[in-house]
Image (tube, helix red, strand yellow):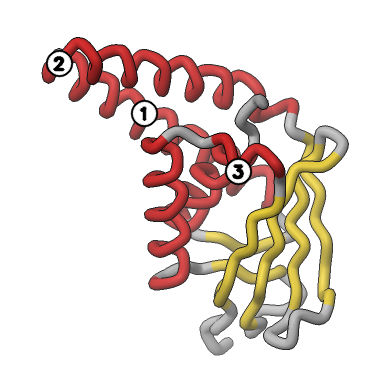
Amino acid sequence: MAEAKGRLTRIALEGVSLHRLSALQEADRDQAVADLQAENAFYPTAHPDLQSIVHLSIRDGRLIFDIRDETDAPVLAVGLAMSPFKMLLKDYQMLLDSYAHAIAEGREAKIQAIDMGRRGLHNEGATLMAARLEGKVEIDFPTARRLFTLVCALHQKL
């Protein structure tokens, strides 16, 4: 069997919270988008060679992956309940708040510790993301990690 060639070619984030991000959140979001566009493994299970565009949003308590082909025509919509992500998102927000305080205080050791915690939280989020998409969308760990970063950006409270 030939190796699948499907990948994510563009991601469009949709939501009002994107206009209220901190500088750190914007940097994380921009880096995740750039990394995803440079390298990823992402395709609907039924379409292993799809070069996809994904419109990612949160609507009615669900994370929506609106997967489209290269012409932006709909292929598949996958909706995931946000409740399994809730604690991770809450912990992520607390880490961001702690990070901002540590920066304001100039506490380098605390900044490094918080950053390590943030990386661990992203890894946990990536594992959950891959598990929730299983059977619907094929995804590798780095792609899942970057998508979790984008979910954190989309989920910010106004």
The tag earlier along the polypeptide, 2 or 3, is 3
Helix, strand or loop for disc 1: helix
Quarter holding the N terminus is bottom right
The tag earlier along the polypeptide, 1 or 3, is 3
- Neighbour tally class for label 1: few under 14, some 14-19, many 20 plus, Cα within 10 Å: some
Which of the two residues, 126 or 12, is positioned nearer the viewer here?
Answer: 12
Question: Quarter-wise, where is residue 132 in the image?
Answer: top right
Vertical comparison of 71 with 126: above or below: below
Rounded to the nearest angstrom, the CA distance separating label 2 from label 3 is 27 Å
Q: What is the residue that sits farthest to the right in this orientation?
A: 60
Q: Which residue is mark 1?
A: 118
Q: Amino acid at mark 3?
A: Leu
Give me the residue at 80% from left, 56% from top: 78
Which of the two residues, 137 or 117, is positioned nearer the viewer here?
Answer: 117
Question: Quarter-wise, where is residue 66 in the image?
Answer: bottom right
Q: Position of residue 117 (x, y in %)?
A: 33, 23
Label pair 2/3, CB-CB below 8 angstroms:
no
Marks 1, 2: nearer the viewer: 2
Q: Position of residue 8 (x, y in %)?
A: 57, 72
Q: Which residue is mark 2?
A: 106
Q: Position of residue 137 (x, y in %)?
A: 68, 61
Give me the residue at 19% from left, 14% from top: 110
Which of the two residues, 17 or 135, is positioned nearer the viewer here?
Answer: 17
Helix, strand or loop for disc 3: helix
Rounded to the nearest angstrom, the CA distance separating label 1 from label 3 is 20 Å
* Count of marks, rendered view: 3
Rounded to the nearest angstrom, the CA distance separating label 1 from label 2 is 18 Å
Quarter holding the C terminus is top right
In the rendered structure, the answer to whether residue 66 lies left or right of residue 134 reads right
Q: Amino acid at mark 2?
A: Gly
Q: Which residue is mark 3?
A: 18
Give me the residue at 55% from left, 40% from top: 153
